[in-house]
Image: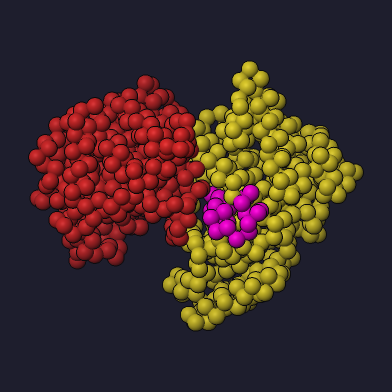
Chain colours: A red, B yellow
């Protein structure tokens, strides 16, 4: 087990009707002016936005609002949010939505808390935020885990670069997680979320550390629960227990728990960022689903025993210890079949990605030759292109 | 899944050499005067206490010290600590030790932070602390999980009452967890710790909620890792990975994770408190080990399917779905055999408990008729006596 230094202070208010506490909570914490940040019309149509405003009014908490967050949140809207925070002297950002709204809120919080710095510099690794405006959330989508994580991912539309940036300033003060608020999430988005949640655990699981028995076991247990809940939620979107499992698993998969004691770098996430960076219409979960099995088959020969353990413990594949590669490949196939069963793409062809863009995507993924991706197998530009090619054909 | 509201802010600094950071950390947090609190001579003999003092000296942080914490920490020493904190204007309590030292430190923190209240009132549920002096820890024993929990357990020697009290004020500011500091823990104490860690998860697992798939899976995974690590550490006390697994599992088993979404009351812990309250020579883990299987066999008929799931998933017992009781009993037996294999007692006779005390212990456990213990099966005084009797004969 590798050394680690962690603190996950985010308060989680989990369960039915949690959102009804939001006004009281914000007043008790002592905030005066809230920026309510959200995406499209769904929080209006569902009545959630109106309900939150009423609750804030009732408690005498002031607010301004900014909607319009896109599935891959953009730098331009973040800049608008930062400006609004300064002008209105906002002291809390309340995200109502999923990972995109949360990530946009975190970025606004960083920018507004550091008036002398361009917020994009943080995402380029040129500086670290010295202060921030805190973020709270009402979660409406189980997927990114952003409601309890240090992550934020942002796209600079001018350059087409999509970049992640981790910071303790990104851990929300509190997140309200009511599984019922995800009942209306479509089959497709539920599938995307299930893949994303699994991937946050899988990418840690397939890091390169050899010894982390307890983190392995916890991760395997979490994956089993998610696989089952994903199946149920796909068939019955209003199954409370399945929605609750996905929601809590989403938070646990990206808050650090499934990676403590391990060394990892989320290679598939890095590759996927180039996909949805170039094709903003591609949902993050769908991009991950289209890439994962090809990535896994490509790196697997470097450590088949690891993939065999995954196959045996998570998918109950009979272990072939003389030929761990057989077991490993069966586990990868089981994962791919599962993604398919949720209606998720398992090839880039299905996503209508153009093969002639592979080189450009790989070039960007190396930050124009300035990085390789560490992992079970190290990925430089030629390896990235190889994985994109393997992932192309429809299967 | 039941609603929950949680925050686990304790910072964990996990791994080799973590204790070397303690001076710097305390200075950076801005504390001026530390009460170093510890047990017997082992932290002196190992050189750890001297090392910590040097590190504090080097950073210019002042300190006073108070040793002498017993395995079942006592109210009288806590009162002494409170007095010392007041006199010396202590602003941080640094616990060096295991659960007893931590619990004593937390109690001192409560008492010193509430000068107008008798600290024992908190343990009797007569009041809640309004303030506290924070606690930090250097952990030397994997068992109680107190380094990341809201728990504290204290014994009032005058009345023989041992009582637990949970409070957010009990979550340490930070805990330094270096598995190597547990290499010197004896076989017996390692066994006690392994049982205690398992029990913190098992007591949540055998609460009465029906649906909590993800918490179940995480708990089962954690238990598997602990069972394996406990075996290894018993054979090879200097196996880093095994010691690391026990240490991290200890924190996770009692920080809330393995109970979120579940309703439970730790019945075996309540019964055990009467054992070690009456016989302070009995180690907490040994008392739990002596009671658990008898408790389990007693309550199991009320929900055999639950115990059968445990047997099948944790102990790989073949499931007999027509007769879940068979599967259930095999799982209980496997647990009992495992405890034995670690040299732990599995009967009260081995602990030389006097059967004529059962009634008094049960009477105290009901708080003299003022409570029953909710659970899969509700326990009132007659049921408690029955379990003590079942647990008596040597097996």
At a point 19% along the width and 54% down the height, the residue shown is A366
Residue A202: give x, y in percent of width and height: 37, 42
Residue A34: give x, y in percent of width and height: 29, 49
At a point 41% along the width and 50% down the height, the residue shown is A259
> Depth check: B170 or B392 in front?
B392
Residue A86 located left or right of residue B129: left
Residue B107: give x, y in percent of width and height: 64, 61
Residue A361 located left or right of residue B332: left
Residue A246 among magenta residues: no
Residue A187 located left or right of residue A314: left
- The residue furthest right is B356
Q: Quadrant of residue B270?
A: top right
Q: Which quarter shows the C terminus of chain A?
A: top left
> Depth check: A350 or B119 in front?
A350
| Position of A44 relative to A121 (above/below) | above
Total numbered labels placed on residues in the image: 0
Q: Quadrant of residue B146?
A: bottom right
Residue B312 located left or right of residue A71: right
| Position of B100 relative to A352 (above/below) | below
Residue B136 in view (yes/no): yes
- Magenta range is B230-252
At a point 31% along the width and 44% down the height, the residue shown is A299
Q: Quadrant of residue B53?
A: bottom right
Residue A291: give x, y in percent of width and height: 25, 38
Residue B235 among magenta residues: yes
Q: Give the main secondary structure of the magenta stretch.
A: helix
At a point 57% along the width and 64% down the height, the residue shown is B180
> Depth check: B383 or A6 in front?
A6
Residue A37 in view (yes/no): no
């Amino acid at each position: 087990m590798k050394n680690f230094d962690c603190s996950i202070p985010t308060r989680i208010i989990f369960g039915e009707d949690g959102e009804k506490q939001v006004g009281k909570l914000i007043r008790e914490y002592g905030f005066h002016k809230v920026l309510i940040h959200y995406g499209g019309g769904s929080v209006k149509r569902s009545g959630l936005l109106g309900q939150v405003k009423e609750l804030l009014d009732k408690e005498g908490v002031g607010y301004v609002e900014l909607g319009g967050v896109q599935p891959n949140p953009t730098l331009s809207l973040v800049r608008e949010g930062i400006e609004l925070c300064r002008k209105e002297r906002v002291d809390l950002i309340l995200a109502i939505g999923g990972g995109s709204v949360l990530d946009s809120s975190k970025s606004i919080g960083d920018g507004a808390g550091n008036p002398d710095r361009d917020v994009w510099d943080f995402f380029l690794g040129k500086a670290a935020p010295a202060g921030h405006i805190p973020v709270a959330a009402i979660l409406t989508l189980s997927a990114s885990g952003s409601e309890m994580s240090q992550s934020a991912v942002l796209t600079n539309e001018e350059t087409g670069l999509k970049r992640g940036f981790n910071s303790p300033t990104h851990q929300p003060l509190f997140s309200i997680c009511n599984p019922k608020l995800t009942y209306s999430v479509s089959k497709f988005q539920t599938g995307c979320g299930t893949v994303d949640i699994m991937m946050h655990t899988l990418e840690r699981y397939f890091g390169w550390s050899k010894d982390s028995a307890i983190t392995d076991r916890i991760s395997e247990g979490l994956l089993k629960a998610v696989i089952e809940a994903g199946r149920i939620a796909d068939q019955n979107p209003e199954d409370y227990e399945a929605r609750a499992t996905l929601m809590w698993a989403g938070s646990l998969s990206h808050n650090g728990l499934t990676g403590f004691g391990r060394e990892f770098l989320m290679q598939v996430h890095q590759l996927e960022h180039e996909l949805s960076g170039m094709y903003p219409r591609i949902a993050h979960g769908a991009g991950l689903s289209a890439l994962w099995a090809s990535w896994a088959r490509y790196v697997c020969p470097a450590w088949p025993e690891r993939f065999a353990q995954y196959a045996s413990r998570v998918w109950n594949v009979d272990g072939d210890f003389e030929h761990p590669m057989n077991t490993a490949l069966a586990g990868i196939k089981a994962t791919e079949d599962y993604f398919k069963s949720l209606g998720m793409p398992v090839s880039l062809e299905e996503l209508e990605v153009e093969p002639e863009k592979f080189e450009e995507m790989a070039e960007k993924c190396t930050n124009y030759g300035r990085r390789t991706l560490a992992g079970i197998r190290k990925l430089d530009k030629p390896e990235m292109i190889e994985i994109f090619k393997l992932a192309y054909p429809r299967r």
